[in-house]
Amino acid sequence: MKLIFERSREGRGTAYLPACDVPERLPAGELRKAPLRLAQVPETEVDRHYSELAQQTHGVNKGFYPLGSCTMKYNPAVNEYAASLPGFTDIHPLQDADSVKGAEELCSRLERYLAEITGMDAVTLQPAAGAHGEFTGLLLIKAYHRACGNTARKKIIVPDSAHGTNPASASMAGFDVVSIASDAHGCVDLDALRAAVGEDTAGLMLTNPNTVGLFDPNILEITRIVHEAGGLCYYDGANLNAVMGIARPGDMGFDVVHVNLHKTFSTPHGGGGPGSGPVGCRQFLARFLPHTGGAESIGDVRSFGGNFLVAVKAFAYILSIGAEGVPLAASNAVLNANYMRVKLADVYPMAYDTVCMHEFVMSLEKLHHETGVSALDVAKAMLDHGIHPPTMYFPLIVHEALMVEPTETETKETLDDAIAILRGIRDAAQADPASMHEMPLHTPVRRLDEVGAARNPVIKYAF
Amino acid sequence: MSGYIPNTSAEQQEMLRESGFSGFDDLYRDVPESVRLKKPLNLPGASSELEVRRELERLAAENTVYRHVFRGAGAYRHYIPAIVDEVTGKEEFRTAYTPYQAEISQGVLQSIFEYQTDICELTGLDAANASVYDGATAAAEACEMCRDRKRSRVLVSACVDPKIVSVVRTYSFGRDAEVTLVPEKDGVTDMEALASLLGDDVACLLIQHPNYYGDLEDMRAAADLVHGAGAKLIASVNPTSLAVLPAPGEYGADVAVGDGQPLGLPLSWGGPYVGFMAATEKMMRKLPGRIVGQTTDCDGKRAFVLTLQAREQHIRREKASSNICSNEALCAMRVAVYLAAMGPEGLRQAAVQSSSKAHYLCEKLEEAGFVRAYKGCEFFHEFVTDSPRSSELLAALKAEGILGGLPLDDHRILWCATEMNTREEIDMVAAIAKEVSRS
Amino acid sequence: MNFPKDLKYTGTHEWVKFEDEKTAYVGITDYAQDALGDLVFVNLPGEGDEVASGEAFADVESVKAVSDVNSPVTGTVAEVNEELADEPQKMNEAPYEAWFVKVENISGCADLMDADAYEEYIKTCD
């Protein structure tokens, strides 16, 4: 389809502003000479252009989206309504406190709710996404060790199954990353952890349930080992949806937590953002939190108080489901995942064949070895069935991985359909493996030349 | 039937049975008893949608929405054509994840490609990313782009928005790297001080244009000084101003950053906004975050895909230059739709009217006795007044339902005007200012 | 797969071609390029940078991975092959022409294999 710039015709457009009612004045001095080739299109064309783009986009509204680690649950409509209220959208971030009492009440209540769910004492809403929350949380750990005079604590321990953001965040916070291998069950290898901790340990970053979808049964021992070595424990909340209301990071021994409002708390992901990554911590770290103006605060991690409208949506969600709904959402997410896992395990070997939490990881290594059909091929074949594929090739410790996270908001029929489709793809892969490399056939575009895109980057329109 | 869970209790029980579990508790057999939550969460009980609406409407009503706004300082009220909400409210855009599966994500990918093109056009630079969190984090990330082993000190003009300075300092605390402020002189960056601070260890200068006080900097002089010392120039810019002020590429900026909020995003008490970043071709691979590139599919059809991914955290892990994963895609789309709707002429009108109204407001305030500070500088749509009656004026305006400028201290006010402010409104401010001066 | 006789090889799949005792060209082997898949970019050091044998001096990127390239020798980078930035496919198409850097003032080197030994060695890899 056309680019908006290819729809452009000189002189076209829609006028939105009245004539200027004061004398025109621009600053003296140098003005812009460079051309400004924005599209010149009337509103009808703008509207149709984006309608066409929307048709070429798969959202949760269109179909099943079992993208592991991303918690693509339904985004309730009432959240959107709430976030569109002018009392929220049209307030300036630098208005006097007495003119934004509603916004302040909402944020402080949301902070309290998140503290309760995570078992933490204090929460900041400033971080704009999960990775931003990780960075913030690690800076709290850094500031704490500094305040204690422990400048030698430079190392953050990260399991090899971790999301890439964990080691990247640790580097940004000035730490050295120590990667430890997982054990045969995909969990933290306690001996490896014991060997890794020491006087240079600043802390541990852990996702629990972990990235293979398992709750680490040794969690208390893990946090104890780190604490005894003088380190702090960071909880990556990417998988909180499995255990909210069931078990709290604070009760597992964690000191700092981030949560993803755009995963666990139903706010939509917007094709890549905006998200929101609030950080919670124990009382002894609260004095380092960002955006407090306090002498020991780490400062600010962005302008203003956070992605406020995202917070509004998460707040509406928590009000809707309430105290009893939080664990119910978690346990149904876990049920849906286990239901799919059990019904697929005979044809898709599970990386860890045991009860899973909200997601499970299949390994297509055997299929790949026998037929040449890869995890990528299976994922691409799913596209023709209107299902967003699972997360591919993650975690790195599982070969030919497909990570499936159905979430609690899907019906049994949707799960049954997806199971049937996946089983069908497996049959097709064995019957006619060659055809699998051609999939998908019926999507707006087919497989792309990613190598060409990276070798000769074209990242803007050539006028 | 709560928590947006569609399956009935009977269906849930059936699914448990079919998967071989004795009950919900059995699903959590790996969770040690000692970490299980034994009491209900201390949260309110579930609410019906009607109750949720009532509560949210009550909270929204507790906030004052000013009809007349003369405050900017990093968040600007501009006109947003209705089409922007209409288009970006489409559920496909709103509910999609990051476009990892290109075959079913062409809509989002193409919109980002168009946004990247818009940002390159506005800034006059070669390469833009798909967005970062906001203008302040864009500035902090840009500083990291310029740092290397030999040059790690970052110079930041004291005329940069203090919120941005704070974020640059926080990111630098992470990297254990140094930030040095270049002092202000008469409302702009002190170029003599800049010259004396430059050295072999300096990675870059971060300078804002127009600066925090609304004043125009001598960007060419700054670029010459910085480049002469082998460092890079990062221009933090207001995107609306770029319709009339020189593009950063014109005065030699290596990286341009800013907040896209003025281009189609509501004030929203500070977020979500969107940070834009553009750089010279030479620095393209140092850009953090997602970048969309053009390619073809196996049938030869033009298509778009996330590219240059080996820079990013999911591949480079601890060696990645940034940890950013989620960005502000839907906000970037708002910017793209805004720019498509307004067009070059519409954006120019918004810029010209903002400048014109700010100058008119300034003139009227001066007549009323609120004189402009930093008179030697040219300004765009923000300026500072200096008067002992400042707090009285702001209080008097507030009483009339007007959000006046931002008090910088007890005598200076940072004002802003945009195309949203009518002449009548400005005259009203001037009349109130006159009264305050007289009393 | 092709392993020219006039080159020396490392256990981490780099080749080195000595001009004389103090000067050599360095690149990655046919085996390496095949294992890495389509390469899309290479991050090279700057002229004048010091490289040390056995330590990473560059990295190569495919679409979904990045891999370090170790230096077989210790010395100073005299020249870098800028051409690879524009034509990364050369690393796949002609790995022994696609040299990464020319190193001079060589003061030491890693354990190197000749072509025959390397060909035996790669049978043990995978």
Image: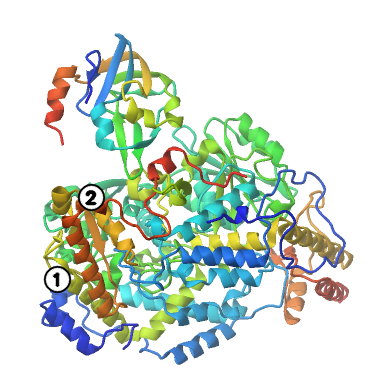
Q: Which residue is mark 2?
A: A434
- Counting residues from the start of the chain, the first of labels 1 and 2 encountered is 1
Q: Residues within 10 Å of mark 2 (few under 14, many from 20)?
A: some
- Residue situated furthest top in the rendering: C20
Q: Residue at x 34, y 23 (%)?
A: C51
Q: Is residue B98 left or right of residue C119?
A: right
| Image quarter in which the N terminus of chain B is found | bottom left
Q: Which residue is mark 1?
A: A342
Q: Is residue A264 left or right of residue B416?
A: left
What's the amino acid at mark 2? Ala
What's the amino acid at mark 1? Val
Chain label for disc 1:
A
Q: Residue at x 52, y 52 (%)?
A: B113
Residue A32 position within the rendered picture, expressed as x and y whole percent measured from the top left? 74, 46
**Rendered image quadrant of residue C11:** top left
Residue A208 position within the rendered picture, expressed as x and y whole percent measured from the top left? 24, 64
Using the image as rendered, state which of residue A298 and residue B377 is in the foreground: B377
